Amino acid sequence: MLEADALDDHRRALRIAVLAKQVPVPDSLELQPDGRLRRDGLVLEMNPYCRRAVAKGVALARSSEGSCTVFTLGPPPAEDVLREAIAWGAGEGVHLCDAAFAGSDTLATARALAAALRREGFFDLVLVGQDSVDGGTGQVGPELAELLDLPFASGARRMRVAGNALHLGLEHEDGWEEIEVSMPAVVSVAERLCAPCKASAEARASVPPGRIRRVTAARLGTGPWGEAGSPTKVGATRALHDRREATVLSGDLASQVATALRMLEDRGALSGQADPQAGPPVEQAVVSTVMSPAHRWPAVAVLLQPDRPRAAAELLGAATRLAGQLQGGVLALLVPPAVGPASADEEVAASLGALGAYEVVRITARQAGAPLAAEDVAAALARWAAANHPKVLLAASSTFSREVVARTAAALGAGLIADAVAVDVIDGTLVARKSAFSGSLLADVTCTSPVQLVTVRPGALTQAPSAGPPALVSYLGADQRGRQQRRLLRQDGECDALDRADVVVGIGRGVHPSEYAAVEALSTVLGAQLAATRKVTDQGWLPRYRQVGITGRSISPRLYVALGLSGAANHMLGVRAAGTIMAINADASAPVFGLSDVGILGDWRQAVALLTDCLRARTMARGIGKAPTQG
């Protein structure tokens, strides 16, 4: 933990640290003929989420008459991030810059930053960006909190300081939470927390050199740093190309709509009998086999949240396949529900056993009455993993599980691969595939640590059929630290509604909320769910649980209809497993057409009206009624 004197409740001057990262501008990314990223000539900038962290850190320092210090780790050009932060109002910058830091994964990065923060002394608050657009891991914040023994909160959209406490409103993937956290603490900020810091090139150039201090690896200790201290390794990378027909129609809209509907019928996108050749290849899971007790280790452990049944089925399906390759078994670690009573042991044993788990370890609070925080579950999980030595630990990329697994990885010194879209065992080694650089690349990542931890994007894996006997049930007690107090928890919708949907209509910023009625009419006749791009949820036009893409969720509907969106890679990555994609756009050069099977060129409003009328007539002619699923 950061060394500190006791804070007085009346102390108002806050000492704030902000961690900022330099990333490539997505539009500057270019792939070489061999599929690798061209690194020379990249345009670099401060990560968009970090811009909010810097802006909030400066504002809190000013209002409390305190100080704001910004840290970054990276090569010499990363100094520009610190210059921009100082030009915006930060007091000083600390640049961790040394060839020894090259090749740092998230854990090595968190270790170096933790050492730098300890070296600088006490900070009341450490702010980080909720995510990074180049890798989308969200790991450094909770790993840093674990290394510093501090509480962590993710996705702060509201923040108020009262004495030694932070009152936070947290934006989760499927709802809203209000908590009180004792300081010092680490907090990741949501993109809508505040306006971003942005300084001109002239303002950045005018920052005096003395405001930035460079710190080498030797000044932080013996390490190991960089690649030597990184338990994850990046292997082969490839351009992320989806197999799509990219047929863009022409002519009057009525003819285009009629042709598009015929194409969708031929592909099985409307009837549910999908063309087996349609869409990109997706990972196939295998039926589980019951393992004898002697063959249940090495175990593939799965961390499950009871309010995410679809994610549980996907994870257990993947675990069953991995366990078969490793000649082991599947063990489920079940956390208590966020609200409401827990299911009975018999129900848990039957339901999770049927999905392939031979044992269920229920994580329970030792002290009654208070819910378990992510840090409490992580401490119990790290203790269990150190004693039982699982080979693999899988979890969903939810807000809660990401913190639990990141803290566990830091406590164990283990490799963590975040937001994987596929997992496999190759020559006895777990290989996870994840997207990088705003979805333009797919990279193979492995871990060198004895236990390998992976968080998986919701909807990225197929569910596996299984038929196992009831699982054994045991218990793992977890102590509550009490550093977080929940004041409110609200779920904005069914967190896996999009995961279950056969048809999804996705809307971008080109569709204004005043026009949503027309889109909902189409969704109703299709029996579809609504999805959105990040720009839509950032505006607050739709809740965040409907966000699809690299910073949202992945889905695999039979049909995805894209309206009013350009087709940016960071969104389309989330729908690459769709059976058929149809795009409607008035811009013939929109990238979405190259990533779709069927394209209608024209005004989306007119096209949607024609589509809705044609589909209603089709339904009436066939005498088929489909109940709407939009809610």
Image (cartoon, helix red, strand yellow):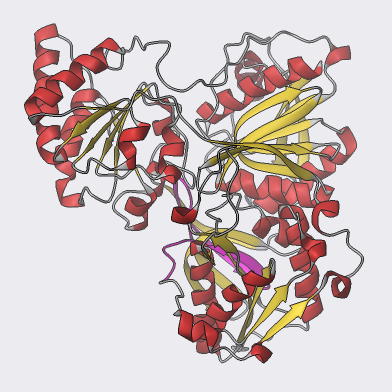
Outermost front residue: 33
Residue at x-position 61% and y-position 91%: 208
Position of residue 170 measured from the top left corner of the image (x, y, whole percent): 49, 59
Give the quarter of the image for residue 163: bottom right
Span highlighted in magenta in the image: 170-194
Q: Relative to 27, does residue 283 appear above or below in the rendering? A: above
Give the quarter of the image for residue 150: bottom right
Which of 590/73 is in front? 590
Residue at x-position 49% and y-position 76%: 55
Residue at x-position 7% and y-position 30%: 252
Q: Is residue 361 visible?
A: no
Which of 401/462 is in front? 462
Which of 429/200 is in front? 200
Q: Quadrant of the N terminus?
A: bottom right
Position of residue 345 measured from the top left corner of the image (x, y, whole percent): 66, 24
- Whether the magenta-drawn stretch holds residue 76 is answered as no
Position of residue 129 measured from the top left corner of the image (x, y, whole percent): 56, 63
- Whether the magenta-drawn stretch holds residue 177 is answered as yes
Q: Main secondary structure of the magenta part?
A: strand
Q: Please indicate whether residue 97 sits to the left or right of residue 506 in the image.
A: right
Q: Relative to 435, does residue 614 appear above or below in the rendering? A: above
Q: Relative to 26, does residue 545 appear above or below in the rendering? A: above
